[in-house]
Structure formats: structure tokens, C-alpha cells
Amino acid sequence: MQKLKLVTIVAEAVLEERLLRELRQLGARGYTLVMARGEGTRGVHASSWEGPNLRIETLVSPEVAERIMSYVADHYFADYAVIVYCMDAEVIRGEKYL
Amino acid sequence: MQKLKLVTIVAEAVLEERLLRELRQLGARGYTLVMARGEGTRGVHASSWEGPNLRIETLVSPEVAERIMSYVADHYFADYAVIVYCMDAEVIRGEKYL
Amino acid sequence: MQKLKLVTIVAEAVLEERLLRELRQLGARGYTLVMARGEGTRGVHASSWEGPNLRIETLVSPEVAERIMSYVADHYFADYAVIVYCMDAEVIRGEKYL
């Protein structure tokens, strides 16, 4: 078993195309997306927007995980209702995901 | 990066309003909800109910995580088809979630 | 609190019945299923299939988790667009899940 990171992003549905493109550029090789509802912490300048959310997950190396988390914090936290977190995950044949 | 806990609750859809209100009262600052299907362990007195489930996630401090898990076990396990578990999660700017 | 494993499988929707039956045979006592979209690593012989995915989670013992992960890798990775990973999870009254 190899150790990877599962990064989860929850964001407004309108950000789908942009986020998926950026994830690819940051090194993610795949993703799983489900529609969600939610409430939560908002960026200082974010409107109190309510509506469908994306919940996007991607299995990546620790390096790519850190890159994604920093990128999302730097580019979205101020202006969008976005959260991102990362967890340890074990996989078999980890080269599939890298 | 800060360490938080991701608490996940899977429960009958009819419990949505009550669970979300209780999560807030127990200290959660946000949640992500998706509709799910499932089968699984039932409380001793729970009917063999089948239907749509809620899958609710919330990022919280370790203290709030323990409080939520104990509360859900004490108030739901006997009579409802509810599961709850908690996992380590890393976040950037953790004060957003506390 | 007891430590269990949360195993997640993401697979083509057409595999639902087969995967759920196999999970039960491998020792899972329950599951949570959501519909998802995704893109990602494909088996060498897998067609570049696109369509709805299943995201199936199950809370199991470490032994059952390993059994499921090996089984899925051996039986699906070559021919299907399937991923599987496992994470540490803490539960209360863990005997509920075993």
C-alpha cells in the first residue's frame, strides 16, 4: 500500500470549470465530483451566497496536495465560499494516481 | 497547516433539520450535505427502514468532534439508522473553521 | 473510540449490483452510496468511458479493508475505470460496524 493525500474542495457550483482546469494544471490526474448543499465559513468579501455546491475530491501526492491547498487558499479564500482540506489515504498500485 | 477533524454523519433524510440544528448547537460552524443511499447497521430498536439518506460532513476542532460523536451515539443509535465517524484532516488557515 | 477503516470505491455505475454483492461477501456490513461524476486513471484495457460514477463508502475492520482493496485491484483495475482507497476513521461503539 502506498500513502497518498485525498484533497477535498467544496465550492460554489459556478467555479466548476475553472477549478477542474486548475486542479489539472496543479498536477491532479483525476477527480470525483458530487453536488452538495452546505453552509459555512465565508471569505471576508464573499457575499452570503446560497446555492448548489461542488464537492470535488482528488487523490494526489503530498507535494501536489500542498500545492493545491496553497493555491486554493491564495486564490479563493478572500472572495469565494470555498473550503479545502486534505487527508491521508492508502492505495494499492499508487502509480495509477501520480 | 492545522489539524482538524472531519466528522461524517449518515442518517435518514427525515432527520435533516434536527441534525443540522444540533450540529450548530454543538459547535460546528458549517457543513456539507449530500443525498445518499445506503444499507447498514441499525440500532437495536430501529425499524428496517429503507430510503434516502443524508451524508453530512463538518470540519471541527477535536473537542467539538468528540462532543458531536458522543451526542449522536447517545441520542440516535438506539432508535435510528445513524452512523457517525471522524477522521483527521489538515487545513490552511484553520481559524476559518473554528 | 475505536479505529476502523473507511474504504471508498469510485466506479462506473454499471458495476453497482456486482460491487455491492462483492463488498458484502468480503465482510462489509453496510455502505453509503452517492452518484458522482469524474475523470481519472483508467485501466490499461479500459475504454475511455465517460458517464455516471458510483462513490461507495464502507466502514470496516483493517482486515476487511485490506481484503476489499486487494480484491478490487485484482478484479477491476485491468478492465474498468475503478479506484479504491482507504482512510483511518474513529467510531464510537465500533461493534456496530463489525
Image (cartoon, coloured by chain):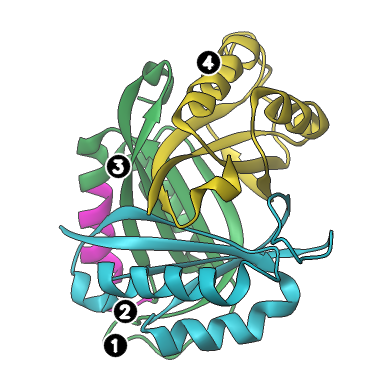
Chain colours: A yellow, B green, C cyan
Per the image, label 4 sits on a secondary structure element best described as: helix
Choose the circle earlier in sequence order: 1 or 3.
3
Q: Is residue C40 above or below residue C29?
A: above
Circle 3 crowding by C-alpha within 10 Å: few under 14, some 14–19, many from 20:
some
The answer to which of A2 and B64 lies nearer the viewer is A2
Circle 2 crowding by C-alpha within 10 Å: few under 14, some 14–19, many from 20:
few
**How far is disc 2 from disc 3 in space, using C-alphas?**
21 Å
Viewer can see residue A28: yes
Mark linked to residue B79: 2
Per the image, label 1 sits on a secondary structure element best described as: loop
Q: Position of residue C33 (x, y in %)?
A: 58, 69
Mark linked to residue A57: none
Viewer-nearest of discs 3 and 4: 4
Segment tinted magenta in the rendering = B67-80
Q: Position of residue C5 (x, y in %)?
A: 32, 61
Choose the circle earlier in sequence order: 2 or 1.
1
Viewer-nearest of discs 1 and 4: 4
Residue under label 4: A70
Could you confirm whether marks 2 and 4 are on the same chain? no
Kind of residue indicated by mark 1: His
CB under 8 Å between callouts 2 and 1?
yes
Q: Position of residue B29 (x, y in %)?
A: 42, 32
Could you confirm whether marks 2 and 3 are on the same chain? yes
CB under 8 Å between callouts 2 and 3?
no
Residue under label 1: B45
Chain letter for the residue marked with disc 3 in the picture = B
Q: Is residue A5 left or right of residue B2?
A: right
The answer to which of C8 and B36 lies nearer the viewer is C8
Q: Is residue C64 left or right of residue A52?
A: left
Residue under label 3: B26
